[in-house]
Image (spheres, rainbow, N blue to C red):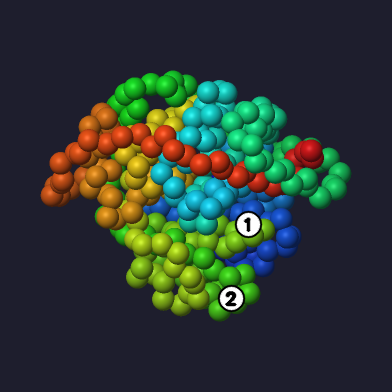
Amino acid sequence: MYHVSLSKEKLKQVAFDLMNLVLFPKEDDWFFNYTCSGSEISMVMTAEMVSMFPAHTLQVYEGAWRAMAVFYGSYQHHVSGSIDEVSSILANAGISIYHLGTGNNDYILVQEAHLPLALQSLKEHYRTIRITQPKPQASSPPLDLAKVKQEAVRHTKGPDCDPKATEATGGMECRLLKEELYFCRVNKEDRPECAQALLRMIFKSESNFFSFTETEDEISLIIEQKDLKGFSVEVISDPWRPIQRLSKASLFEVGVIHKMTLPISAAKIPLVYLNTFDSAFIFVQTKNFKSAQSILEYNGMVLVVEPETRIPLKQMEVNKDMGPHHFVAPLVPYQTSF
């Protein structure tokens, strides 16, 4: 997998390629994410997908990543403490991660070179880990960004974070967004009915947030209620509010997800976490939003927000009764095979 950024000014240049990715997937083990937030368009895609785009339209982080799908057994995908627990394990192993929460599942992406260590670390903590072997495929060389004529973004090592730090979010700056968002599921057979609405969201929408993720198992959306018109979807959640991290040093930070989610998870508040190319978002249910705001402020986070009525911070306890998680690592064979 590769992390890709697209300027909104270049949407018209890549319209045909985006339509193909969203409406006409080619493979059963498809993995594609498109997230638009404000002025940013962020995507996660394979090397083959990157090579489809016209020259000089994309910014691409150098280096391949691999995806692991995380299932929580009988627990809800947003069970409090789950993201924090998993990210803590990988942070302790010194592994930077890219996290995509879709409303159905969580997907954790790790750098190709760190995949064996990530799996070993998870196996040491969880009994139930199943690895689906990729389909047989000849080994392919890493993506040559010069050959496909796309701009390469070099690795810059972000500051490592101590996952055991007590001041979990001190100094981080975030924006509390007003939009209420819904996590929705689209049946793949309903894609033709949703085609016009999908294209409207990608090319004409003025909404501040929209995310589309397709994997082998699902199509999922994160979308505002006013934009649901034209979609044949199953709304799988009550409304959620996003908290956006305003500054991000690098995709290669270690422990940041753990540090951002720890205070909220400790308060037993369910959350969903989603990375983008330049930012990151924590989603909490609207009914818990003011509590999450108070908790983050209490832990030293700098919040950019218009004046609102706030509720007092209550005494919270860490949830230590987490059940066993079930991990499935579909190890998509885009660069190397297992």
Q: Amino acid at mark 1?
A: Thr
Looking at the image, residue 212 lies above or below residue 68: below
Side of 316 where 48 appears, left or right: right
Q: Secondary structure at mark 1?
A: loop
Residue 238 visible in the current orientation: yes
Q: Are marks 2 and 1 in contact (CB under 8 Å)?
A: no
Residue 10 visible in the current orientation: no
The answer to which of 234 and 1 lies nearer the viewer is 234
Looking at the image, residue 324 lies above or below residue 210: above
- Which x, y percent locates residue 105? 54, 52
The answer to which of 116 and 56 lies nearer the viewer is 116
Who's the residue at 44% across and 47% down the image? 79
- Which x, y percent locates residue 21? 63, 61
Image quadrant containing the C terminus = top right
Q: Going from the N terminus, do you reach mark 2 or mark 1 first?
A: 2
Quarter of image, res 247: top left
Q: Amino acid at mark 2?
A: Asp
Quarter of image, res 217: bottom right
Who's the residue at 47% across and 21% down the image? 160
> Rounded to the nearest whole Å, what is the CA distance between mark 2 and mark 1?
15 Å
Q: Secondary structure at mark 2?
A: helix
Side of 241 where 96 appears, left or right: right
Q: How many C-alpha atoms fall within 10 Å of the one at disc 2: few (<14), some, or many (≥20)? A: few
- Which x, y percent locates residue 178? 27, 55
- Which x, y percent locates residue 243? 33, 45
Residue on which the image places disc 2: 190
Who's the residue at 74% across and 37% down the image? 142
Residue on which the image places disc 1: 215
Q: How many C-alpha atoms fall within 10 Å of the one at disc 1: few (<14), some, or many (≥20)? A: some
Looking at the image, residue 171 lies above or below residue 219: above
